[in-house]
Amino acid sequence: MSRPASHTFPGTIPPRAGVGLKPQHYHEILETRPEVGFFEVHAENYMGAGGPPHRYLEAIRAEYPLSLHGVGLSIGADRPLDSDHLDRLAALVTRYQPELFSEHLAWSSHDAGFFNDLLPVPYTNETLNRICDHIDQVQSVLGRQMLLENPSTYLAFTESTWEEVDFIAEIARRSGCGLLLDVNNVHVSAANQNWFPRDYIARYPLAQVRELHLAGFAPERDEAGQPLLIDSHDRPVDHDVWDLYAYTLSLTGPLPTLIEWDADVPAWSTLLAEAQRADAVMDATCNEGVEHAVAL
Amino acid sequence: MPSLFERQADFGAALLDPARAVPEGLVGPDGRPSARRFAVYRNNVVLSLIDALAEAYPVVQRLVGEDFFGATARVFVTENPPDSPVMLRYGAGFADFLDGFPPLENLPYIGDVARVERAYLASYHAPEATALTVEAMMATAPETLLEMGMVLHPSCRIVTSDYPVGTIWQENSAAGQPAPIDLAVGGETVLIARPEARVDLRLLPEAPAQFLLSLGAGHSLTRAAETALRTTPDQDISSLLSGVISLGLIVGLQPVACESAATRD
């Protein structure tokens, strides 16, 4: 497997909290120029030819570091990547020069069409080979490293032969991709799969992690009464996830951290407060870590 | 062990068809099959597609109510899942679907309202273009200009309906005040355009409507003017043209392919 030809970045995303950019907040962000580390956008929302989305994104990108987050490439599908879609992503990367580009360990397109959801993959050698080939192709077309995000899952496949964390580590090793560690997804999947979330984090290939995600989930139960957490992105980050975030940072040091809130989007001030809380956790955890190291 | 292809074909087919059995080999942490867990994916897919339609067709939703819209959209999305990951294009056939949806027979205008919303969305995402100024247009000799075609702004859309769709749209958009719908006022033609940052929707009287439709079809200024005059003989064509220019709707001039007086209809 080849490594990406180049790793040229327009700049770097600071190890601070950023926020998922929503159209409801375009105006207020440009008016108030809030102190956040970066903004992240879903690439597919900017695949129109022109109009307000591009006008606002250009204005906001001029002031802030930008992370481009794809939600529709279907990297985990059994078929070749949609080359038109890859070209659209490449055009956005060229136009906006984002500091980071990320996609998901998931699939979303098949014969029936595009499902508009991040569907789980079985962790088998066949899937592993597919995904590594696809990531090679993405990195070669975009001419840069991509980050792969760990999924939130609600069930397991009986045919899986890899544990998720080993599967992801092997993808990163083979393809040279970076990783986006979604801490809420770890919490959700761990509850749904009966894993220990801190074990998962501790075993994760943390040296490859370039960004963290935080979001809210909806707690439900399955028919056997077992916890079934839904990755809903429609509420504040849960306190257990804040704890897991602090634990993660204690192992990685400070990292760009995104607050995701995609449904029932609240007022900008609420998102800003979540970002400030992430910054506070990062300061407390990482400075404490430094003092601790000095004390040793 | 199923291949990845078999696994995803089976999984995908079951997502959109609630009558289909949950695929085998999908289990919870106790190793037992769990329909409830698979249902999360079914719900996510269907609800996210319904939400996408609701975002694209807010006026239709307001007219039929949230519950009715959800039930209608559910039928549409399971029969017409997106064929592209670019969701901002999703829902192209929704207006035709509404026209043929028996429970909506008593709202004959609903399909055309959806057409207005579709046009609004297309206008919103259309390419940018710079409008021609009067001065730029004057640089062309009048006799030449009359035989030229006008390139309309790429965000221009015109929806013609037998129903008062512009009024219905305005009264039921987010900023509107819903009022009883009076179909007796007759049909309307609506212009939707985004010459600058904002999409504007305005009702077009007959002469401007025919004028813009003719220009949009690639006809010359002369032919477009004749078409307008046929509907409204006392229409002042120069004020019509300057109005269209001042709205920023013309972005260029183009030659017209072989248009003799004999072929003018």
Image (cartoon, coloured by chain):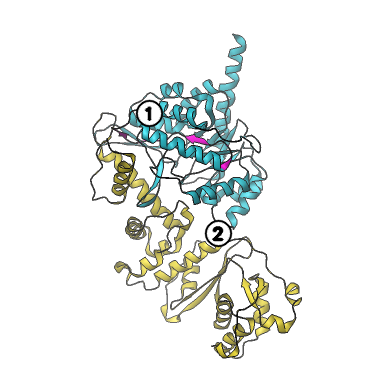
Chain colours: A cyan, B yellow
Task: State which region is magenta.
Answer: A142-164
In percent of width and height, residue A164 lies at: 39, 29
Between A296 and A91, the one nearer to me in the picture: A91
Q: Is residue A101 magenta?
A: no
Amino acid at dot 1: Ala
Whole-number angstrom distance, CA of label 2 to CA of label 1:
40 Å
Quarter of the image where one finds residue B215? bottom right
Q: Residues within 10 Å of mark 1 (few under 14, many from 20)?
A: many
Identify the element where label 1 is drawn.
helix
Which label belongs to residue B17?
none
Kindly identify which residue carries mark 1: A190
The answer to whether residue B147 is above or below residue B6 is below
What's the magenta bit mostly, secondary-structure-wise?
A: loop
The answer to whether residue B180 is above or below residue A160 is below
| Quarter of the picture holding the N terminus of chain B | top left
Kindly identify which residue carries mark 2: B125
Q: Which marked residue is nearer to the observer: mark 2 or mark 1?
A: 2
Residue beneath the point at 54% across and 75% down = B203
